[in-house]
Image (cartoon, rainbow, N blue to C red):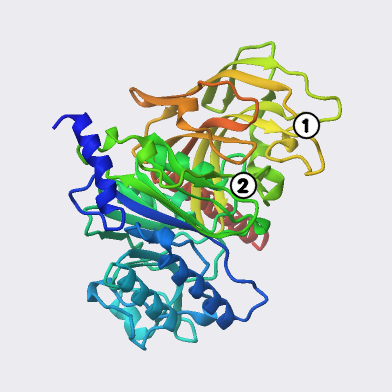
Amino acid sequence: MIVGEFILIFIASFAVYSRQTSTPQLPFYTAGVVEFKGASSTLDDLEQVNNNLAAYLEIISSQEAAETDIIAFPEGTLNSALQSTFVPDPKLNITPCNQTQYAYFLQKLSCQAKISKKYVVVNLVEKENCTAESQIANKDPRRCASYGLNQYNTNVVFDRNGVIVSRYRKFNLYYEPWNVTLRPEYGQFTTDFGVKFGHFVCFDILFYTPTTELIKSNITDFIFTTKWFSELPFLTAVQYQQSWAYSYDVNLLAAGASNPSTGNTGSGIYLGKKGALLSVMKSTPERKLYVARVPKKGFPGSNSIPVQNLQIRNKRATTSSINNLLVKRDRRIDSFITVPLNTSTQHVQLCYRDLCCNFNYKTTLLKPPANSLSYQYRLAVFDGDRIYPGIDPLGWSVCSVMACINNTLEGCGLGFNETVRVSPQLRFDHILIEANFTKTENNLLMPNSVDESLMPLGIESFRFNISDAGYKNIARFELLKPRDDLIQFGIYVSFFGERSSTSHLTQISNNLLILCSLFIVFKLKNL
């Protein structure tokens, strides 16, 4: 069959399958991601769960959800520690619907998945009995809490019959009070429409385990439940979601909690190197389902499907400005090596230890109104670690053009006050950033960008490629279309495994040496 005939059949099939489920024979499935505002904290715990559950059930059974094969809800918007639930092991093939040993909201969600005939992914607080005997059986040397329960940040997946087919307990916690499993779990399940999914939670996306390990097992479609706290200039929600999916060239369904006043928003459906089908960054909270048809990776002819035939509702919902959303500033950038961007120069090499970044750019000076302020820009390079309490360091490197509210490094990663009129004084007609990075099995080189609306540049606006140069990888990130609204444009590299572990071991060794030295000094003083 030629491609043209295939596309015609594909388009015609919408009329047949618009209210039916996908099948292994179709080149797409229909997915929904929910941007969701949790219930008001003024309600008590039970009232919050009831409120959230009612909204979940309404979304699953809504007309907007009628075409979906799978719906994903975000992290942390269903229940609390005081309203936690037991979750059966997926190996048992249990349907919690009307099974009273489970919390009523787990029962209701199971029943609704069964009624609606959809795969449903939710994130919740799970509880598990912990005894000395169970710890021995699990070969877990850790002691149980005095109240005899473990509590996890858990993804739960229901199939079309309401059966729990997958459970994943978050392994990388971000200042959270939950337990973690002794060994990482790997959330994955296979659907009746021929797609195998991996799934993980929020902070996990920055780590090798479990995300990269799932990718290395040849999973190409992922579900990401998140309650993300956006951070400039590299880690706003949609910015990083698109960058991650692009770099691994996987389909990503990201469902984000929606509370912009505390920094939470960001959902989307991404097709790897084909970019975002839809993406959402909102300045006001919402409870909304976003739907698109997702081409199946590796399905014959799926790469030839026109994007307009995939977008059920073509959404790029954004904040009106970065001032309408609480955004953190990455304080690590104060230790970057930076220089102000000089518009009279078109080539700069900037180095941080052994990492050297080459910047080539062409700019046009603009004339902003006299009563306005403008972003200024710095070229930046960094190579080092980011430390989180209780977690191995994350190795990362950056070559970046960053916007700043003044001519100092401390002004980078910030937005102007909402009362200020902002106008561009510089247009980037072209940017090319090039750098050599040490080649390891466990690093991820990403194109990373964000504009004033807190959205990444579309794939039509840039070119990114990596070439092999022996023990080095050469990364090139190029701006193809003029822009006057850039907040950040750069190469962002995460290092996993050996590099981070080595840094962690080095830190431990150094600490041991310090302790030994102090011990020797103490002994000498007491001779």
Left or right position of 170 against 516: left
Q: Residue tagged by mark 2? A: 231
Q: Is residue 279 above or below residue 31?
A: above
Quadrant housing residue 361: top right
> Residue 163: horizontal and vertical position, in percent?
28, 73
Q: Residue furthest bottom?
A: 100
Instruction: Name the residue type under label 2.
Output: Glu
Give whichever of 460, 448 is nearer the camera. Answer: 460
Q: CA distance from mark 1 to mark 2?
A: 19 Å
- Kindly check if marks 1 and 2 are in contact, taking CB atoms under 8 A apart as contact: no
Q: Is residue 177 above or below residue 45?
A: above
Give whichever of 256, 154 is nearer the camera. Answer: 256
> Residue 439: horizontal and vertical position, in percent?
37, 31
Tag 2's secondary structure? strand
Give whichever of 279, 88 is nearer the camera. Answer: 279
Dot 1 or dot 2, earlier in sequence? 2
Res. 400 visible in picture:
yes
Residue sitting at x 65%, y 73%: 41
